[in-house]
Amino acid sequence: MSTPCTATSSQTGAPCGRYAIAGGTVCPSHGGSAPQVKESAHRRLLDAVDPAIDKLRGLLDSADERIVLQAVRLVLDRAGVGPEERRLTDFTLDDINAAIAELEVQLGYKPPTDYQPNGGTPNA
Ligand SMILES: [Zn+2]
C-alpha cells in the first residue's frame, strides 16, 4: 500500500506529491533513501506481520463466503501450497476429496465429520 510523502517543498510549501518508501513516511528524495530511515521502515513492516496474520486468520471465520475463499487462497499461497507450487499429480484422489470436504465444512456447506445430529450421544 502506497502512502504519500509527508514532506513539503521548501520553496512552495506544497506537499511533495511522491510516494513514501514502503513502511516509511517520506519518499527517497526527502530522506527515504537514508540507511537508518530504510531500516526503520523495514522494522515497521516486520512489526505488522504478526497482526496481519492474526487478521487473516480471523477472516477465515467470516460469515461472507467470498471473504473466506480469498483468505483461504492467501493462506494456502503463503503456506507454499498455492496453485503455482503444487501439481495435481502430487496428490491422491483421497487427498483432494479430503481437502474439498474440509473446505465444505469451513464454508458451512456440511457439518464437521465428527458432528452428531443427536447431540453427541453415541448409538442413540
Ligand atoms: Zn517527498
Image: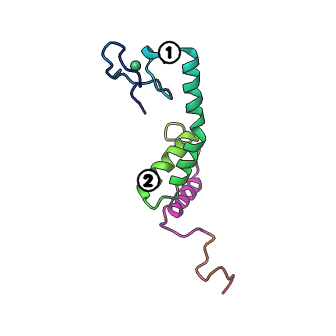
User: Whole-Å distance between the Cαs marked 1 and 2?
Assistant: 37 Å
- Residue name at image x 46 percent, y 23 percent: 21
- Residue name at image x 54 percent, y 58 percent: 97
Q: Looking at the image, what colour scheme do you see?
A: rainbow
Closer to us: 40 or 103? 40
Q: Position of residue 56 (x, y in %)?
A: 53, 48
Dividing the picture into quarters, in which one does residue 15 lie?
top left
Type of amino acid under label 2:
Ile
Numbered disc 1: secondary structure: loop
Q: Are marks 1 and 2 in contact (CB under 8 Å)?
A: no
Q: Position of residue 109 (x, y in %)?
A: 47, 66
Read off the magenta span.
91-113
Q: Can residue 81 be found in the magenta stretch? A: no
Closer to us: 89 or 116? 116
Identify whether 28 is placed above or below 53.
Answer: above
Q: Can residue 104 be found in the magenta stretch? A: yes
- Residue name at image x 59 percent, y 22 percent: 39
Q: Which residue is mark 1?
A: 33
Q: Position of residue 54 (x, y in %)?
A: 58, 48
- Disc 2 residue: CB within 8 Å of ligand 1: no
N-term mark: 1 or 2: 1
Q: Which residue is mark 2?
A: 67
Q: Tell me which image quadrant ligand 1 sits in.
A: top left
